[in-house]
Amino acid sequence: MINSSDTAPPQPDDTPARTGSVGMVHTQLFDFQEPLSLASGQELGPYTLAVQTYGELNADRSNAVLICHALNASHHVAGIDADDPAELGWWDNMVGPGKPVDTNHFFVIGVNNIGSCFGSTGPASIRPETGKPWGAAFPVITVEDWVMAQARLADRLGIKKFAAVMGGSLGGMQALSWSITCPDRVAHCVVIASTPMLSAQNIGFNEVARRAIMTDPQFHGGDYYAHGVVPKHGLAVARMIGHITYLSDDDMAEKFGRALRAPTADGEWRFGYDVEFEVESYLRYQGEKFSKYFDANTYLLITRALDYFDPARHTQGDLARALAPALAKFLLVSFSTDWRFPPARSREIVKALLNNAAAVTYAEIDAPHGHDAFLLDDHRYHAVVREYFKRIAKEVGAHGA
């Protein structure tokens, strides 16, 4: 049995674990010596995966749920991080006792992707051959590479088949890839606010963000670690660009409108290029904060993985043919004001799955928050996920104990 005591100390009765939180959680590091063959033709190994788990794995190991993270998230999905008590899991409102993904019923796994900067092997990790950080030499990674690494972790944990693989945004791409890369290992595929491939506009946003980083004088061709610097200005601009795309126009208007940050006594503009509007102050703050904890090379890697994702690239653009191997049942959720990955892209996936006679549940939520809605507390959205996972729990309960 694997349970929460493997990742956190026992919780007394008055801890948040009784009121919907998984409580204090610890990160586990899993080392893999055998090299991982990458889509690029390169190999990576040895490598390490940073992992957190919540809940208890049942006797036949049938109740495991894999949560795949988005661009700037990590394996810390829920609860309070023992290494940083101020850090709450990025999907804590979704995962925990009594929450939509209920850890009273499921053993939930969060894995930090290879190439990230939160514990798994990435560009800032030491390269065994040189004794120095990988830096620019770190191989380009794809969504399919992440799936293969996660499958190896499942093997290590003795999990032959996941009750569900779930993710939002880039995490949804990983869930979708799981359904066709390892079809016999996924019972349910849950894809939130995602897409079957990036549009030209989305690739364009990613390229502008990458150029902001790569043209920062402190980037040093990706080997800035050796210089003891960080391309923080480029990374901050990249984050500002991304953050704009995560919010809807209505949401930004409601939050900031055209309010001035520090108007003059007579309410006039200052006629300069420093922060004038509240929205500028907010974006600068978000960018500067991001540049203090995220790695620039990781940003390049993950946005390129987003660009490359296209399951139908080998089927002449026929998404139904690309998804034909899938055996899972599907839940897809989109949000009306998500203009980065709009509902039309989710409906493409739904149509392709229906063409294959797959079992599909689809919900389109009218929410004002843009792409970030998948992280927020919308009761309609959470109700859909909750009811779907109740059905999965009944399936698991039929043969798990």
Image (spheres, rainbow, N blue to C red):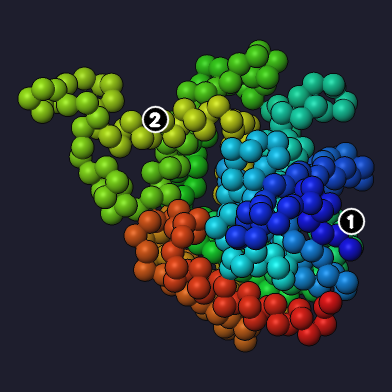
Residue occupying the far right of the picture: 33
**C-beta proximity under 8 Å, tags 1 and 2:** no
Q: Secondary structure at mark 2?
A: helix
Please name the amino acid that badge 1 sits on.
Arg
Q: Secondary structure at mark 1?
A: helix
Please name the amino acid that badge 2 sits on.
Arg
> Residue 180 at what x, y percent from top left?
71, 69
> Total of numbered circles in the picture?
2
The one of 67 and 204 positioned closer to us in this rendering = 67
Q: Residues within 10 Å of mark 1 (few under 14, many from 20)?
A: few
Reading the image, the residue beneath label 2 is: 284
Asked whether residue 296 is in view, the answer is yes
> Residue 243 at what x, y percent from top left?
43, 42
The circle on residue 176 is none
Reading the image, the residue beneath label 1 is: 156
Q: Give the residue drawn at x 36%, y 35%.
A: 282
Give left or right: position of 287 versus 106. left
